[in-house]
Image (cartoon, helix red, strand yellow):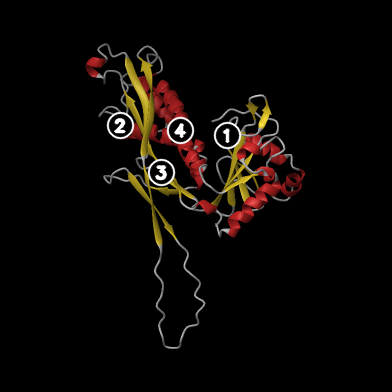
Amino acid sequence: MEYRKLLTFFAEGDPVINTTGTDTLSAEMKTYYDKLLIKLVGPALVHDQFAQLRDIPKNGGKTIEFRKFSPLPKATTPLTEGVTPAGQKMTVTKLEATVSQYGDYITLSDVIQLTAIDKIVVEATQEIADQAGRTLDTVTREVINGGTNVQYAGGAAARTALTATNKLTVKEIMKAVATLKGANARPVDDAYVAIIHPYISYDLMRDEEYKEIFKYTNPKPIYEGEIGKFSNVRFVESTESKIWADAGAVISGSDKYSVFSTLVVGKNAYGTTKVEGGGLQHIVKPLGSAGSSDPLNQRSTVGWKALKTAKILVDDYMVRIESVAGEYAQAEAN
């Protein structure tokens, strides 16, 4: 059922909210609201775009299993005529992670719903979808920014040594790419992917070497948030890229530089759970559904809950470049 048809239905039909909290909700309406939530959540999940995805376990506890296959050794021994070699067995490493549940809701009064029954549910869904997206994206972000394969811009010795001169440059990106290639990390699709904050991409784009390269490398974007490609890296911009406030070198007094993460990742560097297929639920409780706890039918709720986890699978397939944003020295942590 299309959105405009839903509005017509509510305008002409019974003014009672039949949503996911009632048995009288039509299949079309439930599908519409669920898809709306998924659609609105999706674009915010920048860090999940490049993960190995796994289904939420059903009736199997709270543990999800990722598998890492080790490469086979080289077969440098010549075959003997007529003799079958011993062959090899695949080496599989099992990596487990425990899923956790997240969620929140909005309470709607009966008064606010009197004039726009359907519209307020849609607007509330938009708000919780934004919240859900940022929440689930942050869960993944925090895990993968805990990797040990770190590169400090400008050759700094540690995060605490980073100053305004330690900016992200083309040289830093190419160094990270060399590290990934040296580890035999495969590209995600046709290229490696860098998740970068807008403040840092601003610095990068002012690099003279970047300006020259980008004149000849400007393919069509294929990822949500993609802003460009060079040196076999596609750059995906996100304000949710990790920021460590007051974590760099001292500016003056007690003030310190904020440090930004730019993650350059290859295929199967990390894994996470899917949003679709039960990973995210949209829950609407209409007026009158609370029983004696809401005796005057004054409240309804629109909410979400999700099962989520993330896991680094191969640390060598991901490089975290830490740098300072030249003109945004004291950005807030996120």
Q: Residue at x 25, y 12 (%)?
A: 295
- Where residue 11 appears, as percent x and y from the top left, is 38, 20
Residue 243 is marked as 1
Report which residue position mark 4 lands on. Answer: 135
In space, the residues marked 2 and 1 are separated at their CA atoms by: 44 Å
Q: Marks 4 and 1: CB-CB under 8 Å?
A: no
Question: With 202 as the anchor, is 33 left or right in this view?
Answer: left
Q: Quadrant of the C terminus?
A: top right
Q: Residue at x 39, y 39 (%)?
A: 308
In space, the residues marked 4 and 1 are separated at their CA atoms by: 15 Å
Residue at the farthest bottom position:
81
Secondary element at image label 4: helix
Secondary element at image label 1: strand
Name the amino acid type tagged 1: Ile
Residue 274 is marked as 3
Callout 2 crowding tier (Cα within 10 Å): few <14, some 14–19, many ≥20: few
Q: Is residue 254 shown above or below 200?
A: above
